[in-house]
Every structure is written in structure tokens, then in C-alpha cells.
Image (tube, rainbow, N blue to C red):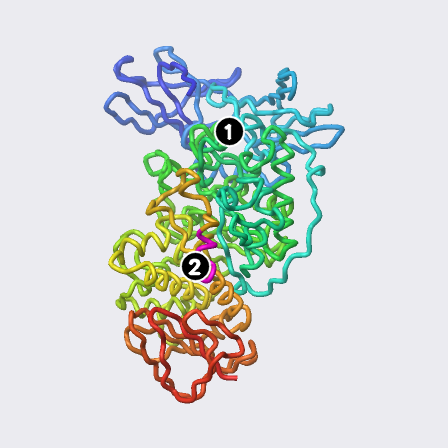
Amino acid sequence: MPYIKRTFEAYLDKMDLITILIPKSYHEGKSNAFNLIHSHSTQELEIIQTVSLEEHIKYECTFSEPVGIGESYEIKEEHGATTDLQIGAVIRTDEFDHSFSYEGKDLGITYDSQETMFRVWAPTATQVKVKVVHPETNEVSIKEMERIERGVWTLTEREEREGYHYAFLVCVNRIWREAVDPYAVALTPNSEYGVIIDLAKTATSKPTKPSFSALTDAVIYEMHVRDFSIHESSGISEKGKYLGVVEEGTKSKHGIKTGLSYLKELGITHVELMPVNDFDGVDELNPKKSYNWGYNPLFFNAPEGSYASDPHNPYARIIELKDMISTLQKNGLRVILDVVYNHVYIREESSFEKIVPGYFFRHDQFGMPSNGTGVGNDFASEKFMARKFIVDSIEYWLREYGVDGFRFDLMGILDIETMKCVRQKIDEVDSTVILFGEGWDLNTPLPYDEKAIIHNAHHLPVVGFFNDRFRDSIKGSTFNLYDRGFIAGHHHKKEEVKQSIAGSVSYEKGSKYLFKEPYQTINYIESHDNHTTWDKLKRCNEHESDDILRKRHRLGTMMVLLSQGIPFLHSGQEFYRTKNGMENSYNAPDSVNALDWDRCYEYDEDVHYIKEIISLRKHHQAFRLPSTSLIREHLSFVDSNDCIVAYKLTNVSKFGPWKNIIVAFNNDLEPQNLILEEEGWHVAVSDMKVDFDGYAYIEGNVINIAPISVLVLFQK
């Protein structure tokens, strides 16, 4: 970090307050007068408070004439020493935010063949320049930008600049910093520069998307671009690349379908891609040397280069990602992006901090950067221009890439108003786009009632939340490896299990609930984070055989798919994905993270079963009722022993081919009996057998449920 030696320090901390710090080594820190000097004018400051600190005397001063943010000032104290007036805590005041909020849609670059316009928001800068680099000769051109309204700087170059690299040079508090445009949509390898491109050259045809009328119709499948194809048995040639995800007709060495063909047959509706925006942790020029999930965000509007066929070509990553998305959509799969707006990789090195130091990141009451994310910084979404960046970025991905959903990483760090603005912008473009995130309550200095957390879900009625109550009651606590949930044989959370199955809504009068509507719950037992379900079961039920553990695992996946709400599957969950017991594989090698297509072959029967249960969910809408009112009308629980959780869907023929449905989950090692009020039931699912027409008929009302299994019955 550049350093300027100053005799004393002076900061603009409010629009009407200057704080001066004089070291006690200089005249014992004492001064009775300060003057504020600007150009040829001078005004005397009024000292309103003096505080003795350990090594300094602090003076708080007011002034009569307003200070212009972005202009140069000096402070002179009575002994003759001078210093520059630095931008201090004023940058985090509401007055600053209101004064410099900019609503224009033109930040970044606007390109055509006749000219390129550069615009950057840098209100605290006293000078800003554009650095343009010739892509072949590396010849550098640096030009001054002009300050216009609300702290925006602009420059228009009336020359052909396509393919040129660029960055901004920004002077704040007399320190020059070079920063890549935070709005950059194209980058050189490893994010050294932004690139001026003609986005029109990346246009792809917009396919007709699969129909999607209710959010609860979604079946989400989370996958990592590299994991999906990198395994030696994937049969995919473009391993680890955007293009590899959508290769046609690929098969493993055992002859089973892999890749795109596999996804199509699985029956899911939405593919959720772990981060595909530019991130740190992988050398784009040598991607095989390292691995990363992608939660080290660098630039939010440019695709990651390590997944591109040619990271040197700024167009390749854009075109290939667009092709991947559109091809998935043409094959009946909607596409969700995992977005990471809650933090940046390294705050001090981020363009946000270099361009407007102190603004874009949340600080505590002592002025220190907060760290609720646990990775060193929290994005200050409550600030106007931070919120604007997130909303602008979401709109860019919607309009330019045509995506169908967003999964917000650590959404609880962000504020409710920002998520409302995101939802509003989404609805302006495409109301069928799904929006959900992690609503964990993290230790960030944002008032509790302003956090986009699960307990404030009622303030965000069309935003979904990962349901940790569902996860922990059914699988067992994520944070206690040996805690056992329902599928592991425990019965102590049966009421939470019932609540979860009912969509975590008020399914009967007086019942507890997390959400007002079932489309707010994202039901899951595993994701990329933490132990896979298989690895957890191998530890907490290590006394049981693999055959028993497979049954327990299947039971968990069945409960995800046959509960009200939105089911979420982690890629490979359907064939017992393992990471060899590793809890956090964010930078582990491909040998740990790769989707193991040999395992898919080994458990082909199990995969087929999951496919059929997904088909069952689609077969009858009663398994995915779109509202709380319908759940209350049609769903009730059946009295049973501790080993069974069973529910009934009554009078549901208007939603599908069956009138009444019973779903029962048995977590015991022994078969169990369930006594029903009505007699005469067709068996649709029992112990891995599935038949929508019913492969058996039970005359009476005493129903036998196989050990550790799901039973689905219906009446026509």
C-alpha cells in the first residue's frame, strides 16, 4: 500500500466535521488554531472537542463553508505544519450516500466502432485517468477523465479501441492506485486488465425456455463446471470447460450416459452452477495446477477464464458460457447462477476499495472492517452504490446471458432492501426467474431486522431460503458430525421433520412455521458445503453396513423429493457422492471433488430409482402444492409410531390422476405397520419399486412398510 509521511493527520469524518490527530511527539500534540486552506481561500476551524489519546491529541473541528468532496484541501496548525485533508468516515455517512448516489446505467464502458466511453464512480478522487494498453504492442496511453455529476468521471475516446486493455488510475488522499473496472465484462488472463469488446459479437439465439409456472415445480441440481466433466470416466473431451458441460452423447467407459445426456434423463428442471464469474484460486493459464470452488470473487460481470477453451481470447469465455447456458435451456434445463456478492477475495486489493476507499465494505462502530463472512470483509449492500452494483450486475446476467435464477451465497450478510430491489429488477425482466439464498444470521454490523436472514423471510415473500431445519432434522446437525437425524435412526426431532415435510409453513392452526409460503423453502440434506450425506452417515452410523447406509441415504433423498417446497440435490447425491470424509473441499484436488462417473455406474439401480421419484413428483402436483392455503386444505399427518413419519394428501384429484395419497417414511431396521382410516390402496412406491399405475393393491387398512424405506399409496 502506498504511504505518505505526514506530520499530523486530518480527516473529513462528517460533512460538517473534521478530525485532526497530532502526535504528542510534535509540540506535545497541542495546537490552539487550525486553518482550512482551499485554493486561495482560508477559513478558521472551530475546535469543539479535544481528546487525549495514548500517542495523539484528537481535535474535532467544525467549519462554516462546506467542503467539496473530490477537491484538494490543506490543514495548517498554529506551529506552521500543514497536511492534506483526507477523506475519512464521512464516506460512510448517509449524507455522503445521498449526495453521491448515481442512477445512470452507463458505468464501465460503452462501446461502438466509432467511440468508447469510459465511466467510473469515484466521488472521493481528486483525479482519475484511463490507462489503455495496445493488446499486441503493449503501448500505453494515459488520459485524464472529466468529473461530472455525483462523483462520476468520464472520458470518450473517438478511436477504434476494440480488443484494447484498460484500467483506471485513481488518486484519493494523494495516493494513486490502479484498478480494473469493477463493471468490466471482459478480462485478460488472471484479471490483470479489463478488455474493450463488442458485446454484439457474443450474441447467441435465445431458446424457448421450458415452461415453468410455479416455483415449487422446480427440482434444482447443484453442480460445479469443472467437477462435472473432469473425471477420467466422464467420456467428455472438453474436461473442466464450459463446452464440456454440453457435449452431446457422452458415455463413460462402462457405457452409461454422462454429461448433458445424463442431466436430461435425470428429470431435474434447474441446473445450479457454482460460481462462473471471475474468481481467484485457479491460474487461468495453467488451471490443472490448482482447484477452487469459486467463492473468491474478483469481478462479478465477467466469466471465469479457467473454464474457457482459450483464456487469452476475451471473447471465448463469454461466447462459451452463453453457448453452455443456451444449450442447457434448449435441452429443457433452466440455469441458475450461484452469485457471491457478500464479499470479495481480498478487500485491500479489490477494485471497489482502490477506487472508493472505505465505501463498499461494512465497518464496525470503531471503523474497522467487519468480517461476518469469515473471509475478511462484508460487502456494504445497504450503501446506495453497493446496492446499485448488485442490482446492475443481476440485470446484466439476466439480459445478456438469459439466466433463469440466482442462488445468493451468504445472503444473510446482505440487507433486506437490497434483496427486494433484486427481486423487483428480476420481475421487470422475467418473473419466472427463481431467487434464493443462504439466510444465515452472521455477525455483521447490520441491524437484525434489516438482515436478509431466514428469520426475516416474511419480509421477503418471493425469495427462497436454504432450510437448515429441514437439513438438520432429517440428516443430523451439519456442525456436529455425530449428531443423527431421522434418516440415521433417531426419532427426537419428529415434529421438526413433520414441519419440514409440510413445507415449513403453518400447515395446521397453531403450528410453528418458518415461511409464509412453501416456495420459500429450499429443501436439502447436502450441498457443496460440509460433509456429503454419505460421508456423514459413514461416520455417525459407522456400525452399520454399506447396504444399510445406502438405504438411509436413499430415504433422505426421498424425503427431499417428496416434501412440500423446492427440492435441491447436490450433484452425485443420487449415487452416494463421497469426498473421502473431507468436510471442506473448496481447494482440494480433482481427485476429491470430481463427479465420479464410475460410482454412477456402480449404483445405476439407485440412480434409476431417484429418476423415477423425480418423475413421481412431476406426475402429481399434490407433491408440490404452490401455496400454504392448499397445503392446509389437503395435507395432514397420519398417527404412527416413532419410526414412521406419514402424511396424507386428501381430495387432490384436481392436481393429478389420484384422489388420495399416503406417503410414509420408515427409518427403522425392521418393517413397520401403519394403520389407516380408509381401506383399499394401490401401491405406487415400495422399497425401490415404482409404478404410477400401482403394481399392487391392498384390500385392508393395515399397511406394511419395508425397513428404512418410503411407501407411496394412492386411491383412484
User: What kind of residue is marked 1?
Assistant: Asn
Across and down, in percent, residue 126 comes to 53, 22
Q: Residue at x 55, y 71 (%)?
A: 619
Label 1 neighbour load within 10 Å: few <14, some 14-19, many 20+: few
Nearer the observer, 181 or 339: 339
Question: Relative to 230, does residue 216 appear above or below in the rendering?
Answer: below
The residue identified by callout 1 is 286
Question: Relative to 561, does residue 542 appear above or below in the rendering?
Answer: above
Q: Are marks 2 and 1 in contact (CB under 8 Å)?
A: no
Quick check: 716 left or right of 196?
left
Locate the N terminus and report the quarter of the image it occupies: top left
Quick check: 716 left or right of 396?
left
**Label ID, residue 697:** none
Disc 2 to disc 1, how far (Cα)? 43 Å
Residue numbers of the magenta segment: 599-606
Nearer the observer, 598 or 283: 598
**Label ID, residue 457:** 2
Quick check: 672 left or right of 521?
left
Say which quarter of the image contains residue 374.
top left
Quick check: is 318 in the magenta stretch?
no
Question: Relative to 280, does residue 687 appear above or below in the rendering?
Answer: below
